[in-house]
Amino acid sequence: MAVTVTAEELCIYLGLDTIDEARADLMISQAIALAESVVKPLPDAASAVVLAMAGRAYANPQGIAYETVGPISVQRPQAGLYMTKDERRTLKRLAGRGGAFTVDPTPADADPEATWPIDRDFDDDPRGIWVDLEAGW
């Protein structure tokens, strides 16, 4: 399973008319490398996470976090190529490694029948002679 994301797909994802293909390919390859640090091999559906990471890095290369031009202020997310916690969880879930699980400690050859005496006479003490202790013990 190889994730293939193209510069053209990144262009559509970002809503651009044109894209610098060399720069887009670099962002995509770096996003794939970062995603593979979490899950390797990447599942086919991981292309959405790769597009999101590459898109953030492509759209904000200067790393501007806050910008004011006249009366308009814009705050942008963290700059550079990074992965959010949700993206890490998504990659793990897509690879089948997320969520809860159970471990059954019962051996495969375990006998389902009870191994203790079910019908026993409680008048007979299986431990031997029963000794009554003094009151208070």
Image (cartoon, rainbow, N blue to C red):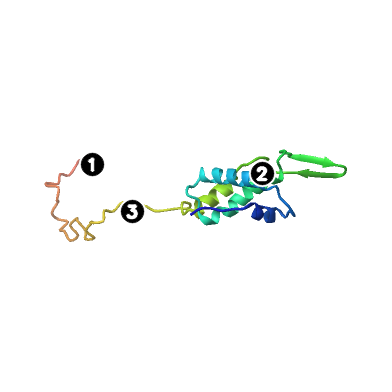
Of labels 1 and 2, the one closer to you? 2
* Badge 3 amino acid: Asp
Residue assigned mark 2? 57
User: Front-most of 93 and 32?
Assistant: 32
Instruction: Choose the circle earlier in sequence order: 3 or 1.
Output: 3
Question: For the point 51% across and 45% down, which residue is it?
Answer: 36
Task: Name the quadrant containing residue 64.
Answer: top right
Label 2: few (<14), some or many (≥20) within 10 Å? many
User: Front-most of 2 and 133?
Assistant: 2
* Quadrant housing the C terminus: top left
Residue assigned mark 1? 135
* Badge 2 amino acid: Ala
Say whether marks 2 and 3 touch (CB < 8 Å). no
Question: For the point 11% across and 46% down, which residue is it?
Answer: 129
Left or right, 26 with reference to 118: right
Q: Residue furthest front?
A: 22
Measure the alpha-carbon separation of dots 3 and 1.
45 Å
Residue 119: x percent and y percent?
17, 61
Measure the alpha-carbon separation of dots 1 and 2.
79 Å
Question: For the point 70% across and 53% down, which residue is it?
Answer: 14
User: Front-most of 33 and 48?
Assistant: 33
